[in-house]
């Protein structure tokens, strides 16, 4: 075989080996880059899922606090007392900082909780606006019957807020449960703390009443 042909075959073989080596190295690089992108995507997905779960838990805590406050304040006696007042006074509970942080991008919330959560916070906003109106000079100038009508409407809104809040809690708990997180214990604990607070307040009021009675000077004989 002529030397020229041998050299040519050697050159071709070397080129072929070079091409194969380049292809294998390039393929390995592409596979490594694809694996890195997939790992990054999965890490970002896990971070998003964790953020969503954190927001769900935070909203559950915020709504639960609002419901507990509602149960504590809107007793039958409190409602009757409010209806009997001509100049009622209350402070709006404008402390929903968790929902405020996500309301401009509700897409972060799971689709199955958006409806009930938005309904609750919309009603909470209505009750806050009506509560703030109790201090408005225009309200103060109304007739007693008109005031009672407005107060009755406020009490209905607050009761609706409680019902919607309990529905939102159920949806949030259901979503968290699918992620392996049980939030029902928090609700049970909040209920126990509410009952404990009520009993402690009763004792404080009783002690205060006894103290007032004993501090009064004896009547004249």
Image: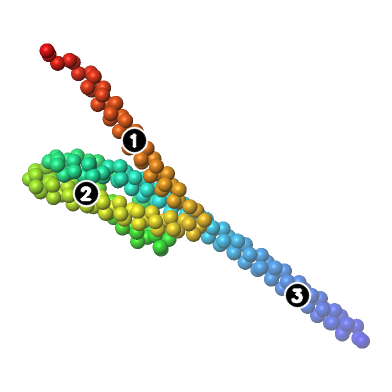
For disc 1, the marked residue is 199
Please, is residue 16 above or below residue 178 in the view? below
For disc 2, the marked residue is 155
| Secondary structure at numbered mark 3 | helix
Disc 2 packing (10 Å; few <14; some 14–19; many ≥20): some
For disc 3, the marked residue is 20
> Does the CB distance between marks 1 and 3 fall below 8 Å?
no
Q: Nearer the viewer, mark 1 or mark 3?
A: 1
Q: Quadrant of residue 22?
A: bottom right
Expressed as whole percent of the image width and height from the top left, the position of residue 115 reads 35, 61
Q: Is 128 left or right of 194, judged from the image as shown?
A: left
> Does the CB distance between marks 3 and 2 fall below 8 Å?
no
Asked whether residue 13 is in view, the answer is yes
Q: Is 17 left or right of 170, judged from the image as shown?
A: right
Disc nearer the start of the sequence (1/2): 2
Asked whether residue 97 is in view, the answer is no
Question: How many dots with numbers?
Answer: 3
**Nearest the eye: 9 or 28:** 28
| Secondary structure at numbered mark 2 | helix
Q: Nearer the viewer, mark 3 or mark 2?
A: 2
Please, is residue 67 above or below residue 41 in the view? above
Distance between the Cα atoms at labels 1 and 3?
82 Å
Q: How is the image coloured?
A: rainbow
Disc nearer the start of the sequence (3/2): 3
């Amino acid at each position: 075989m002529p030397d020229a042909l041998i050299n040519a075959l050697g050159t071709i073989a070397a080129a072929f080996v070079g091409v194969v080596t380049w292809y294998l190295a390039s393929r390995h690089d592409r596979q490594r880059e694809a694996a890195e992108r997939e790992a990054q995507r999965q890490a970002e997905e896990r971070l998003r899922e964790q953020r969503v779960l954190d927001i769900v838990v935070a909203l559950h805590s915020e709504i639960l606090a609002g419901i507990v406050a509602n149960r504590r304040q809107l007793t039958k006696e409190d409602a009757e007392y409010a209806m009997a007042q001509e100049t009622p006074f209350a402070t709006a509970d404008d402390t929903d900082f968790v929902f405020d942080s996500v309301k401009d991008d509700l897409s972060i919330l799971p689709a199955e909780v958006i409806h009930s959560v938005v309904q609750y916070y919309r009603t909470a906003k209505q009750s806050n606006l009506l509560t703030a109106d109790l201090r408005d000079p225009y309200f103060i100038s109304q007739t007693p019957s008109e005031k009672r009508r407005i107060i009755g409407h406020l009490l209905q809104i607050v009761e609706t807020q409680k019902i919607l809040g309990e529905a939102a809690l159920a949806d949030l708990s259901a979503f968290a449960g699918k992620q392996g997180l049980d939030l029902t214990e928090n609700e049970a604990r909040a209920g126990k703390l509410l009952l404990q607070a009520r009993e402690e307040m009763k004792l404080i009021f009783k002690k205060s009443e006894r103290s007032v009675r004993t501090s009064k000077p004896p009547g004249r004989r």
